Image (cartoon, helix red, strand yellow):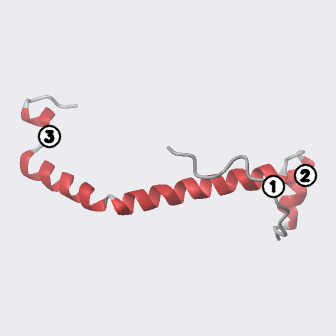
Amino acid sequence: MERMYNRTAPRRAVNLTANSDLVQRVRSEKGNLSLLLEQSMITFLTEQELKHWQHENQAAFNSYNCMIEERCTLSEDIGQDL
């Protein structure tokens, strides 16, 4: 997968609101809020890229599924159950 963001971009301060109990619990566990936010954003972007890819390739998925329904898979054709 290609790099989805510039890892060398400068850091920037942002103002956020979050559940105060979650913030307190993360801090009590010595969690890094900035790192957790960045990891969450990476996860979110990865999921969004997958959704976009699936949407963009839906026609190919449908075509392949129709072909399998009409002709069966190669393994079925030669009598191999995988």
Please state which of the two labelled residues, at mark 1 or mark 2, is closer to the viewer: 1
Q: Residue 70: x and y, percent?
A: 7, 52
For the residues labelled 1 and 2, the Cα–Cα distance comes to 21 Å
- Identified by mark 3, the residue type is Thr
- The disc, 1 or 2, on the residue closer to the chain's N-terminal end is 1
Q: Position of residue 7 (x, y in %)?
A: 69, 47
Look at label 1 and name its amino acid.
Arg
Between 6 and 42, which is closer to the camera in this rendering? 6
Q: Are marks 3 and 1 in contact (CB under 8 Å)?
A: no
Q: Viewed as shown, does residue 10 lie left or right of 75?
A: right
Helix, strand or loop for disc 3: loop
Kindly state the secondary structure of the residue where label 1 is placed.
loop
Relative to 19, say whether 73 is above or below. above
Say which mark, if any, is on residue 11: 1
* Residue displayed at 68% across by 55% down: 40
40 to the left or right of 64:
right
List the residue tagged with mark 3.
73
Number of other residues with Cα within 10 Å of mark 1, as a class: few under 14, some 14 to 19, many 20 or more: few
Residue 27, which numbered label? 2
Residue closest to the eye, 31 or 13: 13
Q: CA distance from mark 3 to mark 1?
A: 51 Å
